[in-house]
Image (cartoon, rainbow, N blue to C red):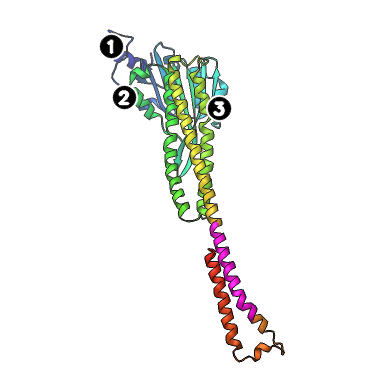
Amino acid sequence: MSVAEKRFAAETPSSSPAEPAPAKVPEQGHLHETGVVASSVYAHGVRIADIPVEEAGAWARKDGHVVWIGLLEPDADLLRRVQQQFNLHPLAVEDATNAHQRPKLEQYGDALFVVARTAQLVDKRIAFGETHIFVGNGYIVSVRHGASTSYRTVRQHWETCPTSLAKGEDFILYAILDFIVDNYMPVLEAIHEEVEEIEDKVLAKPMIRDDIERLYMLRRDLLRLRNAAAPLVDVCQRLANASVPQVRPTLAPMFRDVTDHVRTVQEKIDSLREVLAFAFEVSLLIGQGQENAITKKLASWAAILAVPTAVAGIYGMNFKNMPELELQFGYHTVLVLIVISCTVLYWRFRKNGWL
């Protein structure tokens, strides 16, 4: 009998051996190793023991027991040991090792393999990660890579509600997927606030190069987030259908709810990308309008200055037979005509809105 089995036997009331003790068992840190965030066994929704990986398969084969293992960027040796415990498919294990997969749902015999993309905001950029989930009879294994929030929150939350957790490994799969999708929203909310600031800035003055670069990066990150979230619609729809035997029909509404959340994320992403596109277009229009206004002003002043330039050019040619040069008030007359001409031009341009 293993250490965890002995402890389970000691904590289970003798009058009802099928029912686990309601008290929460403290975590046993010595059972954990590098790469293993948590490795616990549940009976009727109550965590009864923290177990080493080598005992996981035996516990998963017990009726009414579910083993939930959480791994963080495990090495190949650790994944191989987990594979041996649950007889995981080699192709799924290879995908979980490489960690460069698109969101998908694969069925290998009596086990499911689900890939979901995670997202976090790091230094005003969206950082992406992956979660690979193995689901089979009596076990669920989550493998996290890259930027991702720990699923310890999910575990702790549902451990306070054994009735829900007692539904089994397919309910845990729902809880993880729902948590992943919900974590998209804080990222979008932070970007939404920045988009509103960009909108206000665009109306105040044209964008400079740094603003345009930031706008471009936001649109690109939002597109990547959409590509990460959109395939989950198909994944959750398949999980909600009766064609997946590992998921009970009673949980179909929960996966449909996750599908609705993903669609909400998609709509919000599309809305933010459209706003950013409009902001860029408005900035271009404002910039072009200001350039046109400057061009009109320069053209107007050039036309006004052309009058004295032309007159001075004519009388500066130094021809001998120029009768106007002999007039007593010729100089004053020319100045008056220049001033009048320039004044009329200025008035016309000002009236047309060029000055």
Which residue corresponds to mark 1? 13
The kind of secondary structure element at disc 2 is: loop
Q: Tell me what residue is drawn at x 49 percent, y 23 percent.
A: 236
The kind of secondary structure element at disc 3 is: helix
Q: Quadrant of residue 311?
A: bottom right
- Per the rendering, the mark at residue 26 is 2
Looking at marks 1 and 3 on the same chain, the residue that comes earlier in the sequence is marked by 1
Measure the C-alpha gap from mark 2 to mark 3: 33 Å
**Amino acid type at image mark 1:** Pro
In which quadrant is the N terminus drawn? top left
Identify the main secondary structure in magenta: helix
Which residue corresponds to mark 3? 95
- Per the rendering, the mark at residue 313 is none
Q: Tell me what residue is drawn at x 41 percent, y 11 percent.
A: 62
Q: Position of residue 13 (x, y in %)?
A: 28, 11
Residue 286 versus residue 340: which sits nearer the camera? 340
The kind of secondary structure element at disc 1 is: loop
